Amino acid sequence: MAVLTQPTDTTNPFTEVIGNDLAPAGTYIATVIDIRDEFGVVRTKFQSTETEKVDLTTFLFGFRDAQGQPHKVASRRMKISGNEKSALFGFLKSLLGRAPEYGQDYCTLKGAKCLLTVEHVKRRDGVGIFASIAALSPVPQGLAVPALPVAPVPAPVLAPVAPPPIAPVRQASVPAPAAPSIETSDDQIPF
């Protein structure tokens, strides 16, 4: 007996945004561009033939490679769950560098910066590869501000210069006043 089941949608909601661009593998400073939630999605349960209705979320990241070319990569679809063992909880923990707070709206993370590691993974059907997020972490404080471009310093034009005339030294009859004595401690010295 053959049983027809409703097909489940396993495509990423950002497929039309990313297009055919294959983001290069490596680690980059990325920005959360968008977050899409999908409600009431029918899919098969994990390691089962039964279906369930779930709410899913997907994050879209953008970054520029070493040549300055923009790229986009999306996370996998994750069930919206606050369980500490859920994929979304672990994803947010990696992104924030700490456990997310319950009741926090994760959509406020749009525009947030992070370190994103991209890897190339073979598709399950064996035809082609796609860019996948291998790791996430907060941006270390020293990397948060991009380096400012340095303007080239023009080379000085060197020409022979005559030395200044030497003036005769006169001895003054009035002694110089003594410098006042000021006591300072080590914590008062400016750096």
Image (cartoon, grey):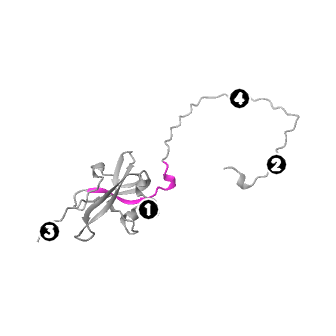
Count neighbours of disc 3 (C-alpha within 10 A) and say few if under 14, some if 14 to 19, many if 20 or more.
few
Q: Is mark 4 in CB contact (under 8 Å) with mark 1? A: no
- As measured in the structure, the alpha-carbon distance from the residue carrying label 4 to the one carrying label 1 is 75 Å
- Left-right relation of 98 to 1: right
Residue at image coords 20%, 61%: 7
Q: Is residue 165 magenta?
A: no
Q: Give the quadrant of the N terminus.
A: bottom left
Label 3 vs 2, first from the N-terminus? 3
User: Closer to us: mark 1 or mark 3?
Assistant: 1
Q: Position of residue 147 (x, y in %)?
A: 49, 46
Mark 1 and mark 2 lie on one chain; the one further toward the N terminus is 1
Residue 135 drawn in magenta: yes
- Asked whether disc 3 touches disc 4, contact meaning CB atoms under 8 Å apart, the reply is no
The image quadrant of residue 132 is: bottom left
Q: Is 151 situated above or below 99? A: above
Mark 3, residue position? 3
Which circle's residue, 4 or 2, is located before the other in the chain? 4
Q: Residue at x 71, y 29 (%)?
A: 164
Furthest-right residue in view?
A: 173
**Depth check: 151 or 40 in front?**
40
Indicate the secondary structure of the residue bearing disc 4: loop
Look at label 1 and name its amino acid.
Gly
Percent position (x, y) of residue 109? 42, 54
On screen, residue 53 above or below 168: below
Amino acid type assigned to the residue bearing label 3 in the image: Val
Q: Position of residue 156 (x, y in %)?
A: 56, 33
Residue lying at 42% horizontally and 50% vertically, measured from the top left: 111
**Which residue is the site of mark 2?**
181
Residue picked out by circle 1:
103
Residue 164 numbered tag: 4
Instruction: Please provide the residue range marked out in magenta.
Output: 129-145
Which tag is nearer the camera, tag 3 or tag 2?
3
